[in-house]
Image (tube, rainbow, N blue to C red):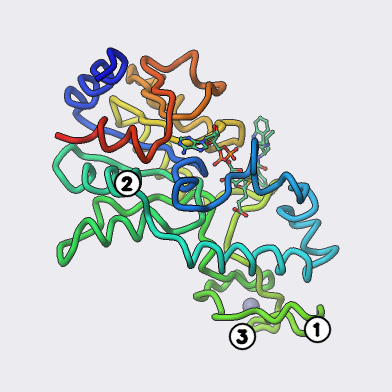
Amino acid sequence: MTQEMSRARRLVAEAGRVVVLSGAGISAESGVPTFRGEGGLWRSYRPEELATPEAFARDPRLVWEWYAWRRELVASCIPNAGHLALARFALAGTPTAIVTQNVDGLHTRAAEEAAGTGDPSPALPIEVHGAIHRDKCSGCDARTPALPEVDVSSPQALPRCAECEGMLRPDVVWFGEALESEVVAHAFRVAHEADLCLVVGTSAVVHPAASVPLATLQNGGTLVEVNLERTPLTGQAEVTLLGPAGELLPELLAG
Ligand code: BJW
Ligand code: ZN
């Protein structure tokens, strides 16, 4: 075991309350592409073409096509050893909150798998950027489970709300949109209460999510980071473990 890993394990063991901030990197080993960097989702699509309300207003068919592709991709993926290690840790005793920027639902599936027939709720994530498996009406904001299939053959065929006929869209947070105020307040509250923030697989450039670890720091807590590379938070982390989350998290969190 490396010295860094021993130090990080000691910080975890001594923590009274833990908050986790996860990003796309934790799901990379499940086969979900990340957003930025090598093989990132947006290498072939510019974010402003797809993940903004303006893009949806301009070309809803293109945006739906991208999300339909991602829904199908995510449905074929399963939680990896990193998701499961976090879920088992959250269920094991130390009060832990998992804040995720991911919309893929893999933390939830890991919580259910780890809990078996027990209660998964201590390991259920706070999803600050929404969920890809839900739709939201752009007219009345009603949320519904995602339709099994979206007909993207023409703008006229795109799904509409059963209540108000408004355009349905994926229930995710696009650039320039406000995060749900209660959800974001919950994320900052648990980060403020934690004495250790474990930051996993995020480039830490998208705000306000990237500021969640700062709430732990401001209250005297410490950061441990797990990533393939350094990020804007690395300078403030007590320990940065460089490597794949699916390998490092089981070693870090095993009792
Ligand atoms: C591994 C690994 C392995 C790989 N193991 N590691 C302050 C300063 C500057 C700008 C702003 C600011 N505050 C707000 C803004 C504007 C903007 C913003 O942050 N812009 C910056 C990019 C400059 N923020 C917003 O617009 C937000 N809204 C807002 O602020 O509203 C204000 C408002 C108030 C009132 C009224 C109206 C408005 C909204 C942000 C929404 C972000 N949405 C997306 C899309 C979600 C839907 C979808 O999935 O389609 O969220 S963008 C995308 O980025 C997605 C992600 O959740 C998010 C973060 O990405 P993440 O997870 O970090 O992924 P990557 O790819 O960047 O990084 C992966 C990392 O993993 C890398 O570091 C790898 O090394 C690592 N890795 N494999 C371990 N195996
Ligand atoms: Zn509606």
**In front: mark 1 or mark 2?**
2
Q: Is residue 154 above or below residue 78?
A: below
Residue that mark 1 sits on:
156
Rate crowding at label 1 as few (under 14), some (14 to 19) or many (20 or more) other CA atoms within 10 Å. Answer: few
**Label 2 element class:** helix
For the residue with label 3, is its CB less than 8 Å from the closest atom of ligand 2? yes
Query: At label 1, which amino acid type do we have?
Result: Gln
Left or right: residue 139 versus residue 102 is right
Q: Residue 154's spot in the image, x, y percent?
A: 81, 80
Q: Quadrant of the C terminus?
A: top left
Q: Secondary structure at mark 3?
A: loop
Q: Amino acid at mark 2?
A: Ala
The picture quadrant for ligand 2 comes to: bottom right
Label number found at residue 163 = 3
| SS category of the residue bearing label 1 | helix
Point out the image quarter for the N terminus. Answer: top left
Residue sitting at 47 percent across and 36 percent down? Answer: 201
Spot occupied by residue 90 in the image (x, y as percentages of width and height): 23, 44
Dividing the picture into quadrants, the one containing residue 4 is top left
Residue at the image point whose x is 23% and y is 34% from the top: 253
Amino acid bearing label 3: Glu
- The image shows a total of numbered marks equal to 3
Work out whether residue 70 or residue 53 is closer to the camera in this orientation and state it: 70
Label located before the other in sequence (3 or 1): 1
Q: Nearer the viewer, residue 160 or 91?
A: 91
- Note whether ligand 1 is within 8 Å of mark 2: no
Labels 2 & 3 near each other (Cβ < 8 A): no
Q: Which residue is mark 2?
A: 81
Cα–Cα span, label 2 and label 3: 41 Å
Residue ID at (74%, 53%): 52
Task: Look at discs 2 and 3 and give the one toward the viewer.
Answer: 2
Neighbour class for label 2 at 10 Å: few (<14), some, many (≥20)?
many
